[in-house]
Amino acid sequence: ANIKVVSWLPQNDLLAHKNIKAFVSHAGHNSFYESSYHGVPLVVFPLCCDQISIATKVKHFGLGVALDLHFVNVQELLEAVQLVVNEVR
């Protein structure tokens, strides 16, 4: 009941919704800027290039948590989401 599957949705509109509590992202520029603008905390998985420096900014500015895609497990992901939902704002 809590999941809606759609073929496309404007990310900025989604992040602006009052019920969004966290955003799991690859740490792209748009994800970083739009979530920061809307005050939505991030859990990021940088994949390459500039995403690594954006993940560093996410941590530095207290905007969320950065995880290593190659070494994270389900429990760590759950804990990261709970952390940003409950403590990052």
Image (cartoon, rainbow, N blue to C red):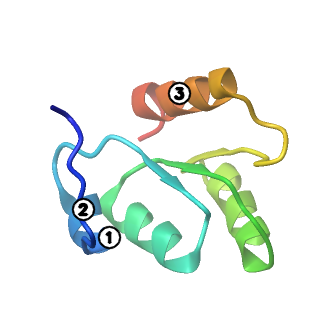
Going by the numbered disc 1, the residue's amino acid type is: Gln
Quote the CA–CA distance across marks 2 and 1: 5 Å
Query: What amino acid is at disc 3?
Result: Leu
What quarter of the picture does the C terminus occupy? top left
- The type of residue carrying mark 2 is Leu
Identify the residue shown where x is 27% and y is 46%: 20
According to the picture, the residue beneath numbered tag 2 turns out to be 14
Q: Residues within 10 Å of mark 2 (few under 14, many from 20)?
A: some
Residue matched to label 3 = 83
* Local crowd size for mark 3, using a 10 Å CA cut-off: few (<14), some (14–19), many (≥20): some
In the image, 1: left or right of 37? left
- The mark nearer the N terminus, 1 or 3, is 1
Up the image or down, 11 lies above or below 22; here it is below
| Residue under pointer 1 | 11
| Residue displayed at 24% across by 70% down | 9
Residue 80 lies in what quarter of the image?
Answer: top right
